[in-house]
Every structure is written in structure tokens, then in C-alpha cells.
Amino acid sequence: MILITSLVLVSFLLVTHYPAFGGSPKGEVLQRMNSASNYYKGKFVNKNPVKTKFSFSETMEMISMFLKGNPQSVPENKIPVQYWEKEDILHLPDSVTTAIWFGHSAFYIKTGGLNILLDPMFGNYPSPFPYLTKRRFNDSLPIQINDLPVIDVVVFSHDHYDHLDYGSILKLKDKVKKFVAPLGVGDHLRTWGVESEKIVEMNWNESIEIQGTSFICTPAQHFSGRGFTNKMSTLWSSWVIKNESSSLFFSGDSGYFEGFKEIGDSYGPFDVCFMECGQYNELWKDIHMFPEETVQAHIDLQGKLLVPIHWGAFSLSVHDWNEPVKRLTLEAQKKGVNATTPIIGEPVTIGNKMEVNDWWSSR
């Protein structure tokens, strides 16, 4: 009984006091959530029924799967990284849109004169505690956070640890003008010292314009939560980013659903679609796409160039680390889809011809 009581007490103290867990929606944001059509009994809901709970046997199957592991889930050799100097980032042209991949779902984007970060998870471990998960594949980032220019907008897709990182926010918050996030996510940021005036929270199909660039919060099929008891308590989303220079789509995390076609019909076509393609499994197929579904989603969105994301940095499933991109490029060839697979740090520039670089095939 003493042991059980101690464990319960430690768990409670961790959830309520450990800063990486973030905050809980309250005040005006909570009022907005309570009046939202996609918020029911204290939880956000997907447009379609989605499996986010597992039976005892399925849970045991997952535990066994991860305990068994897969030695090929991480690369044998170091993966290549293109590095940037501070001056080179500063002098990227305003006249074109340039995207630089940091691995997983993180991007630096220069478009319409704005410096934008997408899901800037720059930490080494996608969990609240180091070593609970495997380390980032690459030893260093294309550019250090301190050398990034002033960031006009940071965009978040949801609050999971591999997308919203406590340590990264602490390093970024004083050089960011605006944080744009789905409803409820802002309270994590406020808990970590970000001023409320810097935070904009949106529900699906709401938008904001910043210096001529529109940021439109669009649906995704996923879930949220950083603690033991707050699952689905904040919203998850994809994003449309549009200006005179380009039209971009950022999937965040999502299972395949008809919402992609609806977004394509409403906001497409897109010059580039940054689409998740990794960390999938049959057990959680509703919330993460298989690579072949990623290609179909890109087609639904009316995308011109497909850039696969949610791979190349962390091992969060048991498939081979490079299986997602192998399957995706093969499916893209079959379907006549233009896809590119840059190394981490390699720029993708709208208007430049981009091809598949199979740097991942021999590692």
C-alpha cells in the first residue's frame, strides 16, 4: 500500500508540476471550446469515428512489438545534414518561397517576406523525459536555434511531444513575434512563459492574415494530449499557408480521410504539400497514414510537389527507418506524382525542379 500510494503521489506531482507537460485550457479559450461543434464533453472529436482506445490484447500486442523492437528502425550510419550559416539564412530572397527541412515535421519557411517555423521540435528526444524514446537520428540541426533570424510566425499542428517541444519553446520564445496554434494549445505556451498577446488559437476553418500571408486552420484526423488525463483536450489540425508567392499545405499528423479532398476543393491547388508518411502501424491506422495513403491524400489536395515528412528523425513505430520514403517514392512513380526527398537542411524552392534524392537508400 505504501508503494502504491507513493507511485500515485509521484504521478500526481509529475502531472501537476513537471513543466514539460504544459498547461490546460482555461478562460476565454475554454469558453470558445465549449461552444465549438467539434468539442463534446470536454474533448475534441474527429469528423469521423476514429479508434484511439485499445483493448487489453491490443495493448499487450503493442508492448510486445516495441519490446521486441527492430534494429532497422534507426539508421546504421549517420544521416547527411546540410548546414547553414546565420548570414545565408538572413539573405534568402523574399521573392520566392523556400522551405528547409529540420527532420520529422519541422520546417523553416521563408515566404512573402515572413520567416515561419512549422512544428519546431528541435530537441533530441520526443518525450517528456530523455531516454524514454530513441534519440534523434542526426547529431546536430542544420542551424542552431540562436542563429535563426527573428521568426515572424510559428505554426503548430498539435501538442504531442514530437511536434511541440518544451525545451525548443524556451529557446525560441523571445525571438518569435506570433505563435499560431489550434484551440487549447496556447495554454501550454502560456505556462512556459509566452505572452498571451503573441498567441493566436483557431478552430478548424478559421484563419488569420499576417503581412499578406493567410494561415488557415484546416481539419486533420488525429488526437492530442501530453499528460495521463488530458487526451483530446486540445485541438489538432492541418494548415493552409497562402500568399501571392505560393500556396502550401502542411498535414501535421493525420490518418487518411475525406477531409483532404474537401481541403483541396476549397483551398487548392497547392504548390507544395508537406505530408506525413511515417510512424504508421495497422493498429493505429486511423491516426497515421501509410505511405500509399499519403500519395493519395496529395492527389486529393491537388498538390503539385509532395514533400514527405514525419520521418527521418525519430523512431516512433517499428518499421524500418527508411521504409516510409521507399514506399512513398514507389507509389508516387506509379501514380505520376512529383515527389522530392531532400536531405535534412536542403532547401526546397518553389519554381525550382526538385527530384528524388535517394540518400536514404544506403544507410
Image (cartoon, grey):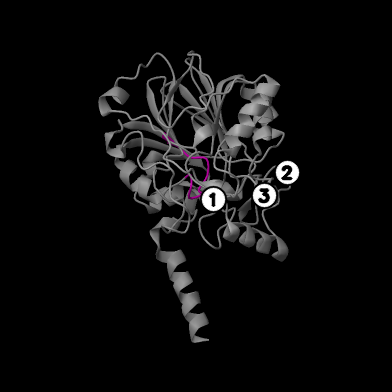
Q: Which span is picked out in magenta? A: 154-163
Which residue is label 3 attached to? 284
Can residue 245 be seen in this snapshot? yes
Q: What residue type is labelled 1?
A: Pro
Quadrant of res 329:
top right
Which residue is label 2 attached to? 48
Which residue is rendered at x = 60% and y = 38% of the image? Answer: 323
Q: Of callouts 1 and 3, which one flags the residue occurring earlier in the amino acid sequence?
A: 1
Which residue is label 1 attached to? 71
Where residue 342 appears, x then y in whole percent?
A: 48, 27
Q: Nearer the viewer, mark 1 or mark 3?
A: 1
Vertical relation: 207 (above or below) 60: above
Q: What element carries label 2?
A: loop
Q: Of callouts 3 and 2, which one flags the residue occurring earlier in the amino acid sequence?
A: 2
Question: Real-space Cα distance between discs 2 and 1?
Answer: 35 Å
Question: Real-space Cα distance between discs 3 and 2?
Answer: 15 Å
